[in-house]
Amino acid sequence: MDRVRAIGADRVIDRNDDIVQCLGEEAVDVVVDNVAGPTFGAMLQVLKRGGRFTSSGAIGGPVVSLDMRTFYLKDLTLVGCTAWDEPVFPNLIGYIERGEIRPLVAKTFPLDQIAAAQREFLEKNHVGNFVLIPPP
């Protein structure tokens, strides 16, 4: 949590804390959740009416419980994302090359150490992304 604060987060909540108790119901406009699992319902509870939930992963578990009343009574928008439109990736690279954004890299691994990278990823002690470097 200290590492996340050090890169500029205003507030950090432990993944084991009750997010509804920490933030309150209807406290945020947007949730970006790549965890899912048992915390999914709470993520919808903290969304304001008209809020948006987006996800591109389910590392906490792919099957979730959804109270449809929360979904429709709050007029929520749920967005899943697995692919980008063609111009998105070149635009992203352009932002990086111009120094307008900086990817958060936790660690790099040679491609032949992919198993070690996966083991370290599963420890969940990193902040940022792991990058695999192909051989020259």
Image (cartoon, helix red, strand yellow):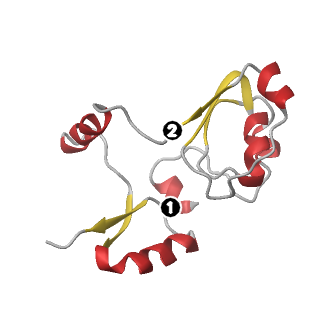
Vertical placement of 97 versus 88: above or below? below
* Label 1: few (<14), some (14–19) or many (≥20) C-alpha neighbours in 10 Å: few
Callouts 2 and 1 close, C-beta under 8 Å: no
Q: Nearer the viewer, residue 3 or 112?
A: 112
Q: Position of 54 compared to 61: left or right? A: left
**To which quarter of the image does residue 97 belong?**
top left
User: Quick one: label 2 or label 1, which is nearer the N terminus?
Assistant: 1
Q: Which residue is mark 2?
A: 81
Q: Amino acid at mark 2?
A: Cys
The residue at the point 43 percent across, 80 percent down is: 116
Q: Nearer the viewer, residue 98 or 33?
A: 33
Q: Position of residue 2 (x, y in %)?
A: 55, 61
Q: Position of residue 87 (x, y in %)?
A: 28, 31
SS at mark 2 in the image: loop
Q: Position of 53 compared to 23: left or right? A: left
CA gap, disc 2 and disc 1:
27 Å
The residue at the point 76 percent across, 46 percent down is: 19
The residue at the point 67 percent across, 58 percent down is: 60
SS at mark 1 in the image: helix
Q: Which residue is mark 1?
A: 3
Q: Position of residue 24 (x, y in %)?
A: 80, 36
Q: Amino acid at mark 1?
A: Arg
User: Mark 2 or mark 1, which is nearer to you?
Assistant: 2
